[in-house]
Structures are given as structure tokens and as C-alpha cells.
Image: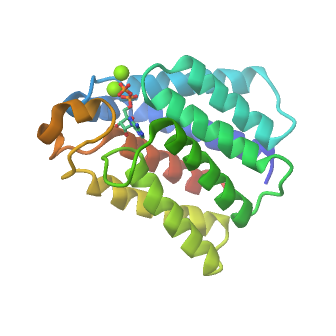
């Protein structure tokens, strides 16, 4: 696993988010301010521009730069949250050999950053409702002997279930929480983009 693999992930994710930008924004128009797709598309196009301009000597340098780019280019909740995820994910991989175990620790560190910033709890109808089951499924897969690809596939599948489970929930964090009970019956945009992120990782890493 080299820097190039993680760069390919970020490029694949950028193109996936671009293709899904209208869909993510439509989800956000129901319970937010109709910008989740455009926020992430803008942020990840900036990440791709950085990848095109610079070369990176290590995985952590690459991921930290991606995180800082997201924090600086994306307004709204999702920029700092995903930016912090990539910053902490990268930091956790500094000096480590990439393995199912180290990537699992790094994913946990990244999600720890999302929680530190956003203070979400399970069931608040946020991206954490996709991340939490994904981390559990990842660990379970690794404990059962999965390789990196297999663990990421398991994580992505669990994230999709967590995403679907956000539909009936009443939002308790972010803009959707302003709607109170009226937020129920809609899929959370951030849980949807988190699922896309993990599906992209499962396609490109390992
Ligand atoms: P904004 O709400 O500022 O317009 P986005 O539309 O880009 O930002 O992102 C909205 C998504 O961010 C939500 O669908 C939710 O998943 C996620 N989110 C919002 N607040 C939080 C939080 N405190 N913790 C975790 N995720 C959050
Ligand atoms: Mg929004
Ligand atoms: Mg906004």
C-alpha cells in the first residue's frame, strides 16, 4: 500500500461525490439548506487540485493535506467534520505500516475527531449513525481474519444499513435538528456521504 493508493481513493471519492452531488443536495433540501452535495463537491475538487499540483512523500502527509483542504474550502458542518476525519486518520497512520489493524485504528481516530467536533451520539441522525456501525463491522471483520479490502467492504455495508436507519429518526444535531419531529422520514445527507466514502475506500484500497 503506497501513497498512490490513498491518492486513488481520494480521486475516486471526488468523482463519486461529484456524480452524487445533486442527490446529496436533494437529501439536504428536505431537512437542511440544500448544499451538502455542492459543499462536498467543491471541497473534493479542491483536494484533487492539490493532488494534481503536489507530490507527497507519505500517506499521512497526503491525508493531512486533504483534511486541511476540506476544512478551509468547505463551509458548513461537513467541511470541518470530514476535514478533521482526514487529519486524524492521516496522523494516526504516520510512521505506521498500512495493515487492516492500523487502518482500523486510524478510522477510529478519524471518527473520534468527528465526535470531538460535532458531539454527536448514536441515533442523533448524523453521519455518525453510518460511522458507528461501520467501525464495529470493520473490527469484527478483522477479528475474523479479513484483509483490508474485506474489512472495508464490511464497513461500507454496515454504513449503508446505518444510513438507511437514519430515515425514521428525529435529528438532534445540525441544521436538521431545527425541524424537530419534521426531520423524521428523511435520510440523513451526511450518513449518505459517509457511506459513499467507505464504498469508495472498499473499491480502491487493499
Ligand atoms: P450544513 O448543515 O452546515 O449545511 P452540510 O449540509 O454540508 O452542512 O452537512 C450536513 C450533514 O452534516 C448532516 O446531514 C449530518 O450528517 C452532518 N452533521 C451536522 N451536524 C453534525 C454533528 N454535530 N455531528 C456529526 N455530524 C453532523
Ligand atoms: Mg447543508
Ligand atoms: Mg450549509
Q: Residue at x 53, y 29 (%)?
A: 80
Tell which of 206 and 91 is nearer to you.
Answer: 91
- Residue 76: image quadrant is top left
Q: Residue at x 31, y 29 (%)?
A: 25
Colour scheme in use: rainbow
- The image position of residue 93, as x and y in percent, is 76, 49
- Give left or right: position of 107 versus 65: left
Which quarter of the rendering shows the C terminus?
bottom right
- In the rendered image of this protein, does residue 30 appear above or below residue 122? above
Q: Residue furthest bottom?
A: 144
Residue 77 at least partly seen: yes
- Give left or right: position of 157 versus 88: left
- The image position of residue 163, as x and y in percent, is 34, 53
- Give left or right: position of 122 versus 68: left
Q: Residue at x 65, y 79 (%)?
A: 145
Quadrant hosting ligand 1: top left
- Residue 49: image quadrant is top right
Tell which of 97 and 179 is nearer to you.
Answer: 179
Q: Residue at x 61, y 53 (%)?
A: 107
- Residue 189: image quadrant is top left
Residue 8 at least partly seen: no
- In the rendered image of this protein, does residue 43 appear above or below residue 190? above
Counting every numbered tag in the picture gives: 0
- The image position of residue 1, as x and y in percent, is 79, 54
- The image position of residue 175, as x and y in percent, is 29, 29
- Give left or right: position of 64 versus 14: right
Amino acid at each position: 500500500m503506497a501513497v498512490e493508493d490513498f491518492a486513488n481513493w481520494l480521486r475516486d471519492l471526488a468523482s463519486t461525490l461529484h456524480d452524487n452531488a445533486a442527490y446529496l443536495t436533494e437529501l439536504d433540501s428536505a431537512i437542511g439548506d440544500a448544499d451538502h452535495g455542492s459543499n462536498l463537491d467543491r471541497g473534493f475538487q479542491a483536494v484533487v487540485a492539490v493532488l494534481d499540483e503536489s507530490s507527497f512523500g507519505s500517506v499521512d502527509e497526503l491525508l493531512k493535506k486533504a483534511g486541511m483542504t476540506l476544512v478551509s474550502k468547505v463551509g458548513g458542518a461537513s467541511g470541518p467534520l470530514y476535514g478533521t476525519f482526514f487529519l486524524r486518520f492521516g496522523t494516526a497512520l504516520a510512521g505506521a505500516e498500512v495493515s487492516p489493524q492500523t487502518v482500523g485504528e486510524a478510522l477510529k481516530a478519524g471518527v473520534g475527531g468527528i465526535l470531538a467536533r460535532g458531539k454527536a451520539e448514536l441515533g442523533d441522525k448524523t453521519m455518525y449513525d453510518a460511522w458507528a456501525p461501520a467501525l464495529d463491522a470493520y473490527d469484527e471483520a478483522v477479528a475474523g481474519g479479513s484483509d483490508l479490502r474485506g474489512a472495508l467492504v464490511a464497513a461500507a455495508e454496515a454504513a449503508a444499513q446505518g444510513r438507511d436507519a437514519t430515515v425514521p429518526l428525529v435529528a438532534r444535531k445540525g441544521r436538521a435538528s431545527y425541524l424537530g419531529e419534521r426531520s423524521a422520514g428523511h435520510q440523513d445527507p451526511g450518513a449518505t456521504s459517509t457511506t459513499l466514502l467507505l464504498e469508495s475506500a472498499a473499491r480502491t484500497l487493499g
